[in-house]
Amino acid sequence: MSELLLISHGRYCEELKKSVEMILGPQENILTLSLGPNDGPDDFRERFEKIMELSDHFTVFADLIGGTPCNIAARVLMEGTKKFDLYAGMNMPMVISYVNACFVDKKGSLVSDAQNGIACVNEIIEQA
């Protein structure tokens, strides 16, 4: 399984990993990198590049397109110094889909799985 790196503002990525582990058990191939309130973009980039040195096979999930964590990862991608898949808008169904796809050695439908995890429960109840 390739490494999955979750990046986010604050501790969102760390807590998302913990929540996924409540469902699927320990996930040693999921790493996290958070941008703290006192971190600058240069600090985050330095830590991002250090993590990227750990493996040649990363997939990166960012919390928000256009946010600092995603922008820094995108800049690294555009510079061509490291190759990885970058997705923004991470959520729990997306991470679970990724882990499940790795178990069966296939690439999951990460974007559609993330989107399909969004539902208005009121509408579902009304239709029942």
Image (tube, rainbow, N blue to C red):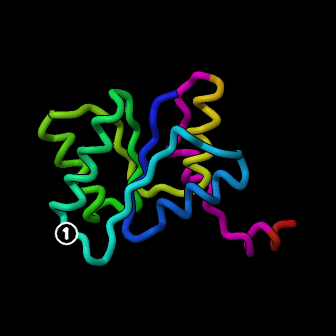
Q: Residue furthest toward the right?
A: 128
Position in image of residue 70 (x %, y %): 29, 56
Q: Is residue 64 left or right of residue 50?
A: right
Question: Is residue 42 on the magenta stretch?
Answer: no
Q: Is residue 57 left or right of residue 121?
A: left
Count of marks, rendered view: 1
Is 92 above or below relative to 24? below
Position in image of residue 67 (x %, y %): 28, 65
Q: Residue at x 56, y 60 (%)?
A: 16
- Secondary structure beneath dot 1 equals loop
Q: Quadrant of the C terminus?
A: bottom right
Q: Residue furthest toward the left?
A: 79
Q: Residue at x 45, y 68 (%)?
A: 11
Q: Is residue 88 left or right of residue 90?
A: left
Question: Is residue 115 on the magenta stretch?
Answer: yes
Q: Residue at x 16, y 41 (%)?
A: 78
